[in-house]
Each structure stands twice: as structure tokens, then as C-alpha cells.
Image (tube, rainbow, N blue to C red):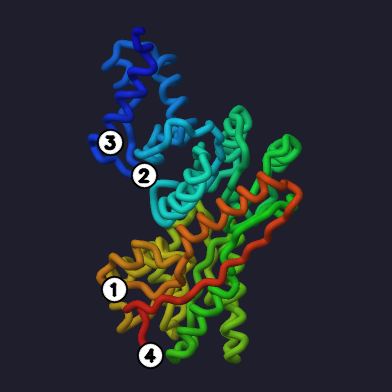
Amino acid sequence: MATLKYQQVKKYIIDFMQAEHLKYGDPIPTESELMKRFDVSRHTVRRALSDLVNEGWLYTMQGSGTYVSDPNADMNISGKMVGIITTYFRDYIFPDIISGMDDVFSEEGYSLLLGTTKNNSTRERVVLNNMLNNQLAGLIVEPSKSVYPNQNIQLYRKFINRGIPVLFIHATYRALETSYVIQDDEYAGYIVTKHLIDLGHKYILGIFKQDDMQGHGRYQGYQNALEEAGINTGDDLVQWFTTEGSRKVASEENIKAWLDENEKVTAFVCYNDKLAVNVLNSLMALGYSVPQDYSIVSFDNSKRANTMVTKLTSVAHPKAELGEKAAHLLIELMKNPNQIFEEVMKPELVIGDSTRKI
């Protein structure tokens, strides 16, 4: 019996992944490349890719492409699919989070359908509508701009009304009563600020993200530590930024202006490692040294925190552990959707080279 065209495409992709020793997250050849190689239609290629997604070999990311999920997947997997929506994907802490989820779901026979929002609720709406057109067993979401009222609440209710459980990570939407796995951001803000206070710092500039709940939690922890130590420096030492203003907030111009206005500042609490790296680079460009002139602390203990010449002191994000926890809880919800899980993970501070005693 002749092998059908789409089956030839499937076999080629599997052989290619194994021959090239592709790992989780590696891209496979594009649809156009596969169409040209086999002289077949886009429909044939998409049928092959769809089969491989359902069988656990691949996952797709809307607007980006198709990537390796498990190069040793079992061809007998039943085709169950879970949706994962994050603000970003191929950068920072997100590959580790997704990998943690995939480790759990692949063992249970689930494949992943991924979408990213760039922390934008309009993009989130597009991704949610795409997810609704697929036969999902469950959905994990990192909210976009979680502090603000969200335009997509009715879409989330559609999932819930269809019996598809929804679990949030990092934050939640107040309008929905759903399960979540979050980090204790208030405690995280407290321990990084207390670390600076214990080193003798009193004038500590805090830079926080205003459109995500994580930023507000970290700010509250920062304030709690200052109040506990009897330090009251006022709002002049707190700077807020939005997703769209994340680059400008740490620019040389802004950093110089803040330091000119607050000459007593000796340390920075930065919303995350991305921001901290930009602040550190701006300070160096202005002729300052870290930690000799200024100490810096941040959040997430990402690869960026550990690959700088000056290793950042940073709160460790659970990353893969959080992903695994979210996956396990969603599986429980898929068995019993009436449960509500409220999981709060306690962070730890990792001491680097970016702080010193004064």
C-alpha cells in the first residue's frame, strides 16, 4: 500500500528531529520548506503537523511557528491538548516555566498549544479566540496587565462554561474566581529591601511595574521593610513604569536625573533582572561602579542575573518548579473542575556581587 503524502511528511519530521538531536523548543522546518521538499499543498503539511502536535511531538506558537515538544514522543498518545498563554515565551524565565509544564503534561499524554500576548490584552483576546477553536482539555494563563480591568473576562467565562478549567500563574484577574499559582511577591519585595537595610542602606530607590500585580506586591514588600526599620523617605524614591516604558525608565538620562534629585541614594530595588541589568549598564555608562558606588537588588534570579560580570543579588523565581506545580494542579482540575487551588510559593534571596555594606 502506498504511503500517503502527509504520512511521508510526518515521518520526515520525526526522522529530522532525531537525526539533528533537536531539543525542547527547537524550531522545525517551516511549512513553506516542507511544501517545497515534498511538492505538496499547505493543507497536507498542516495535516502532518496537526497529527504530530496531537501525538506530543510538537507544539505550535501562534504567529511564530512550530517547535519540538518531545523528540521521543509515543506515537500512541491520545491527542489531548492543553493551552498555555504567557506574556512572553522564548526569553528570560519563560522557557524554564514552559519546560516544567511540558515535563508533567507529556508524561500524562497531553500536548501543548502555546500563545503569547506581549503583555497586551488585545493580543490576549486574539490568542484566547484561537484557543476556543481548539479542543482543549484545560488552560493555563499568565494574565496581561493584571492590575487593570480586563476586556477578555467573558472569553474566560466561555472556557469555564464549556467545562474547560482555567488556572492562572503569577497573578489573577479579580473579576474571576479561578485557581492560581503565584509567587509571594510581597515577601520577595520585603526580603530584598531588608537585605539592603541590613547592609546599612537607608536611601533606597525602588523602581516598580505599575500595570502588573507582581509590581504592586513587590512595592508593598519594599514599603513594609522600610517601615519595619523606621525609614520614611517618601514617594520621591519610588518610580513606576509600564510595559511600554520599560526601556526608557532605566535610560542613562532618567537614571542621571533621579540621582541628581536624590543625592543620598545608595541602592536600587529593581522590578526584575531585565530592568536591573539596564540600570547597571546605565550606571556604568555614567561612570559609576556597582556595588562600590551603588548597590542593586532585583527579582527572578534569571540567567541574565548570573551572566553579568557583576552577578546580581536577586530573589530566585521558582521557574520550572512553578511550571510543574501549575501543570499538576491543572490535571487535578481537569479531573474535578469544582476545586479551587490557591498556591503561593515562597521565594528565597540569592546573594550576588551587586550589593555591599556601607
The alpha-carbon separation of the residues under discs 4 and 3 comes to 52 Å
Task: Assess disc 3: are there few (<14), some (14-19) or many (≥20) residues with their C-alpha within 10 Å of its C-alpha.
Answer: few
Front-lying residue, 278 or 73: 73
Query: Does the residue at mark 1 contact the one at mark 4 (Cβ under 8 Å)?
Result: no
Picture residue at 34% right of the left edge, 69% below the top: 280
Q: Taking 340 as reference, is 267 left or right?
A: left
Query: Considering the numbered disc 4 on the image, is that residue within a helix, a strand or a loop?
Result: loop
Residue 328 in the image: state x and y as whole percent. Answer: 57, 53
Residue annotated with mark 3: 18
Q: Is residue 336 above or below residue 76?
A: below
Picture residue at 36% right of the left edge, 63% below the top: 278
Earlier in the chain: of badge 1 and badge 4, it is 1
Going by the numbered disc 3, the residue's amino acid type is Gln
Earlier in the chain: of badge 2 and badge 4, it is 2
Task: Assess disc 4: are there few (<14), some (14-19) or many (≥20) residues with their C-alpha within 10 Å of its C-alpha.
Answer: few
Residue annotated with mark 4: 357
Going by the numbered disc 2, the residue's amino acid type is Tyr
Earlier in the chain: of badge 2 and badge 1, it is 2
Residue annotated with mark 1: 310
